[in-house]
Amino acid sequence: MKTATSLLVLFLAFATIFDTKCVIQEEEVDCSHYEKLPPGEEIICYKIYAPICGSDGKTYPNDCFFCYEVKRTDDKLKFVHFGEC
């Protein structure tokens, strides 16, 4: 009985650790370290897909693209939620 209980507790611990839905995400995106680019300059962002939904109804591929658009719009674009719109 002790072995079965121990295995069950161990299984639940591993299920909780590796369940991605249990991972706590930040509630907002911090764009404070991004700067507004001069007109005509292109952004260079990484290619990791971690979608962010903006207040304009568009899905941005990751925080880099989202934050550069926030700066381009003079902070008018707001964070809605993580994931696609």
Image (tube, grey):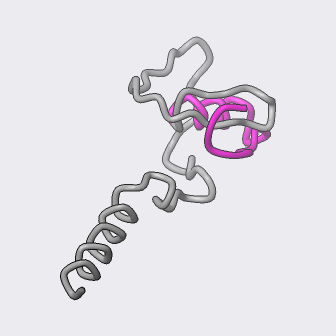
Q: Position of residue 71 (x, y in %)?
A: 65, 36
- In the figure, is residue 31 to the left or right of 54? left
The part of the image, by quadrant, that contains residue 73 is top right
- Is residue 77 magenta-colored? yes
Which of the two residues, 32 or 22, is positioned nearer the viewer here? 22
Picture mark count: 0
Residue 38: image quadrant is top right
The quarter of the rendered structure image containing the C terminus is top right
Q: Quadrant of residue 75?
A: top right
Residue shown at 44% from the left, 52% from the top: 20
* Direction bottom: furthest residue: 2
As rendered, which of 41 and 15 lies closer to the eye? 15
- Tell me if residue 38 is in the magenta stretch: no
- Furthest toward the front, the residue is 1
Which residue is more in the foreground, 76 or 81? 81
Where is residue 69 shown, x and y percent of the image? Answer: 65, 30
Instruction: Please indicate whether residue 46 sits to the left or right of residue 77 in the image.
Output: left
From which residue to which does the magenta span run? 64-85
Q: Residue at x 51, y 54 (%)?
A: 21
Residue depicted at x 36% and y 69%: 12
Which quadrant does the N terminus fall into? Answer: bottom left
Image side of residue 32 versus residue 69, left or right? left
* Left or right: 79 in relation to 82: right
Residue shown at 36% from the left, 61% from the top = 15
